[in-house]
Amino acid sequence: MNEYDSEVISGILKKSGFLSTNNAKEAGIILVNTCSVRQHAEQRACSKIAEYNNLRKKNKNLILCVCGCLAESEAENFVNKIPGINIIVGPNYIRNIDKYIDMVLKNGNIIVATGDLKQDWNRDNTISHKNKNKAWVAINKGCNSFCSYCIVPYVRGREESK
């Protein structure tokens, strides 16, 4: 799902006129798309967020955005513990990422968009595929099972199908 979500985010930002770079030091906006299914993925994401937050301390104009499942489950902790994050977006709200960036650029407010939201699957026509020979295709999201070991229903919501 994170690969798919990243392609959705990339497509939305490209359509809005943003350009991509692999050099964090020259970026105006840094997005970290997170996963919280495994502890190691959480640790790697938190390490990257801290690294980029240090860049933000040096460049006050840099916008730091945390997206994905970890953003959903840890939004309150991020707001309280890492004040450099400008935008926190759960998986259900990534299709509005361009609007949140515009809001931060205009007024500098911190945006937190988490919680349950019905998906607008028709907006997926803005996907920017990394590979022209294959594509990530989401046919459903969430889960209704609520297994004791799994966080998916809590961060991605109830099962919803295309």
Image: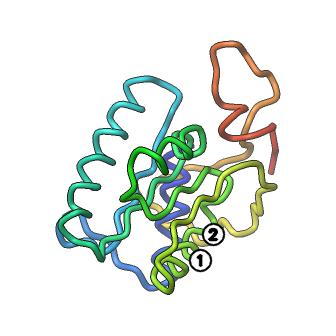
Left or right of 24? Residue 118 is right
Q: CA distance from mark 2 to mark 1?
A: 5 Å
Amino acid identity at mark 1: Lys
Instruction: Identify the mark at residue 108; answer none if there is no mark.
Output: none
Q: Quadrant of the N terminus?
A: top right
Q: Position of residue 91 (x, y in %)?
A: 62, 50
How is the rendered protein coloured? rainbow
User: Are there few (<14), some (14-19), or many (20+) residues within 10 Å of tag 1?
Assistant: few
Whether residue 128 is situated above or below residue 150 in the rendered picture? below
Q: Are marks 2 and 1 in contact (CB under 8 Å)?
A: yes
Secondary structure category for the residue under label 1: helix
Left or right for 12, reference 46: right
Residue drawn at the location 40% of the way across and 31% of the way down: 41
Residue wearing tag 2: 96
Residue found 29% across the figure and 45% down from its top: 48
Total number of numbered discs in the rendering: 2
Residue drawn at (49%, 67%) of the image: 128
Which corner quadrant of the image does residue 31 belong to?
bottom left
* Mark 2 Cα-neighbour bin, 10 Å: few <14, some 14–19, many ≥20: few
User: In terms of depth relative to the viewer, which is nearer, 43 or 61?
Assistant: 61
Q: Position of residue 152 (x, y in %)?
A: 66, 31
Residue 136 picture location, percent across and down: 55, 49
Q: Nearer the viewer, residue 41 or 132?
A: 41
What amino acid is labelled 2 in the image?
Asn
Residue to which mark 1 is pinned: 99
Q: Position of residue 18 (x, y in %)?
A: 40, 80
Q: Residue at x 51, y 73 (%)?
A: 109
> Which residue is more in the foreground, 159 or 130?
159
